[in-house]
Amino acid sequence: MAMTMSPDMVQVALPLPLMQCFTYRVPPAWQDAVQPGCRVLVPFGRRHLTGVVVPEAPPASLPDSLKPILDVLDDEPALTEELLQLTRWMADYYVCSWGEVIRAALPPGLEIESRRRLYPGQPPAEPLSERAAAVLRLVAAHPGITIRRLRQELGSTPYGLLHRLVRAGLLRLEEALEAPRVQIKKERHVRFAPAYRTPAAQEQLLHRLRGARQRALVAALQALQLEGVTEPPRATLLARAGAPPATLRRLVEQGILELVDKEVIRSPLEAEPPPAPSPITFHPEQQAALDRIAEAIDARRFETFLLHGVTGSGKTEVYIAALKRVRRQGRTGIILVPEIALTPQTVQRFRAHFGDEVAVLHSRMSEGERYDTWRQLRTGRYPIVIGPRSAVLAPLENLGLIVVDEEHERSYKQFDPAPRYHARDVAVYRAYLNNAVCVLGSATPSLESYLNARRGKYTLLEMQRRAPTVGRTPARLPQVRLIDLRHTRLANGNPLAPPLVRAIAHRLERGEQVILLQNRRGFAPVLECTACGWSPHCPHCSVTLTYHKVPHQLRCHYCGYATRHPNTCPQCSAATLEPLGTGTQRVEEALQTLFPEARVLRMDLDTTRGRRAHHHLLSRFARGEADILLGTQMVAKGLDFPRVTLVGVVNADTGLLLPDFRADEHTFQLLMQVAGRAGRADRPGEVLLQTRNPDHRVFRYLLRHDYVALALELLAERQQLGYPPYTRLAVVECSGPEETRVQELARSWAERFHHLQQQTPGGHLIEVLGPTPALHERLKGRYRYHVLLKAPRRSDAPALQPLLRRTLESFPSLPRSYRLTLDIDPAGLS
């Protein structure tokens, strides 16, 4: 991508769902400062927005008067040439705007933009409608409220009503620039003025000062200097001296001390020293895998490896050794993990070997922490970053290695908002741009990656044995047993079958630890009246409400709607409401009843909302402060606890019956992953799966830990049915508040695509299915219809993306409140 531009005009990508860039005039004062990758403030309609200058030539025909750039926000480009190339590719492949991808690559909170705010106007002279009166009351109570906030508070208030109230003078609409939400943080530090920086001058000063507090403050500053802190923070010095701020202020006024502002780097790791590294002894399969990866690293050659290793085979040790080789070359590395829950443990293992070279980047960090980490990565302070999918866009230069751990995980796919990218595929392309090595690791690879390896696009490396603990033989894979719930009675609503209860009791007696998986949170997925069959449904989504015993609420897990648990049935007034099914709260209650002495930790979305909650829960379990770790799928992935000898799955059938062609693949991956948490050290492990479908093929292969046999069977089916990885999929979703109109818009879009398809050579090979209602037809008050597109991977078949883009560009603008979204390579069809 050429980085040349006209000095007096530039193309700017804006963070809007518009498939084009916009040309702006560069005033003479900015022409030396504007570079590709710089953020600029530009006018757009009646608003001001932050965009990024991109290295594209302006169109041939331009209007006579171009709008000028208003400000240049960066001294150096925020995005490197390589990241501009990567984001351009992502925009093309995932059929979204370049500005939307760039927004995902920058830390949140940096945007400078104008917002329209509402203020009270003149009082109404005549009665108003109920909706108009509600708007005026809310604006009067919250002057300066944004239109977005007002619509959130009052529901979908029509824009036309707001405009009528403004025109009538009952409301004032003002537009003003908003400062960035996140900025560089600075802290006041204290030092001696130049005349008092020698020990002799300081001693004379102590004798001259009369006030006890002033002498205490000067003595405290001297003591801190002897400890190596020459310019301590103001708060630290005052606390050490026991002096009030006024004392410091007087010493500054007398020219004895000085105050200086210093930048504070906000980091979730700053207070944690790196742990000591554990010795690594490679077994032959590990060494063979590392040798192949090292050869590509040394050659500085792009190559993608699929590291297929059973759980506990030592994949992380291979990643660490490969990264050490990359660091010896002076190159950088990205380590992707599928869940934030895995980040703390992974960071600890890498920091043990790389110390303070490691940064962490994820969405649970504060905006200030993400901004500071992003800046430190951009300047090269941290050459290694660990995080979930968004870390693939970290601003590292000179990349040598990208690792995608548990590459099969669906959490690597971004669902909303755009760009709806898959971090694994972006990682492979970014490694290609940098002549770097990409390692995809998994015990249960995605069928897409496994087929790529079988066809030679990726290099397949296999590790079929577990890694030995230090000085011991390799750990054995755990024994997997099924508990057939068709023939095992569950007493009094207890979700745990007697064999699982006995196995837990046996581990607790031996002082070992247990992990239990129940992939539904809450107490019960359904509340039902046993008299009339009524169940509560979400008023905004086509799903039932989940019962949460704590805090005695019914909740929607899609839109967040919550309401109190009714005492009687609203339909028949009977007091016969019974919770059906099992969630993590119900399992926790059963454990507390069965094992009152056991220490239980529950890990699900409800218990991990707080800051660093994942880290604290897992740290407690690692320290042996709990006997049982119960949770949703976040306990199934990548965790390594040597004292865990039993894994139980409360309902192993969850996911098998979903109307998704990937249901068997995803269920097998989840169960194989959670099974791998057991017996990872010198104690044998056992896995108990409760199921009502014991003859299902997923369990047949799981009992043998036979991923390859299942993968080959599923691949044969996919090829016969024409599903990925043998075809490319795209889902077009139309959504809006009125079902009939949504269905009509989806049908019109499908017809427009079909028209362009007929004009394209080979277009007949693309199959168009739908429109049909989505699996969850209504979510958050919006009806959803899907059009599914299937394109074979044949040389004579046209690419989907150009056809999709042409259809979008030629399709009429949608009515307000209606949306059309594209998902390339969807991870699911819900």
Image (cartoon, grey):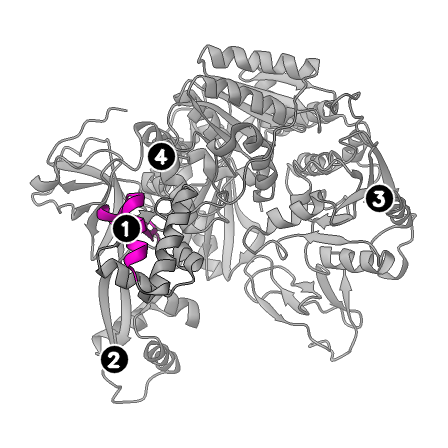
Badge nearest the viewer, 3 or 2? 3
Which residue is under mark 2? 170
Distance from disc 3 to disc 1, alpha carbons, whole Å, reads 55 Å
> What is the three-letter code of the residue carrying label 4?
Arg
Q: CA distance from mark 4 to mark 3?
A: 47 Å
Mark toward the viewer: 1 or 2? 1
Which of the two marks, 2 or 4, is nearer to us in this view?
4
Picture coordinates of residue 431, whole percent (x, y): 44, 23
Number of other residues with Cα within 10 Å of mark 4, as a class: few under 14, some 14 to 19, many 20 or more = some
Identity, as a three-letter code, of the amino acid under mark 1: Val
The three-letter amino acid code for the residue at tag 2 is: Leu
* Residue 506 picture quarter: top right
Magenta stretch: give its range: 182-209
Residue contact between numbered discs 1 and 2, judged by CB atoms under 8 Å: no
Mark 4 = which residue? 378
| Residue tagged 1 | 260
Residue closest to the eye, 357 or 345:
357
The disc placed on residue 511 is 3
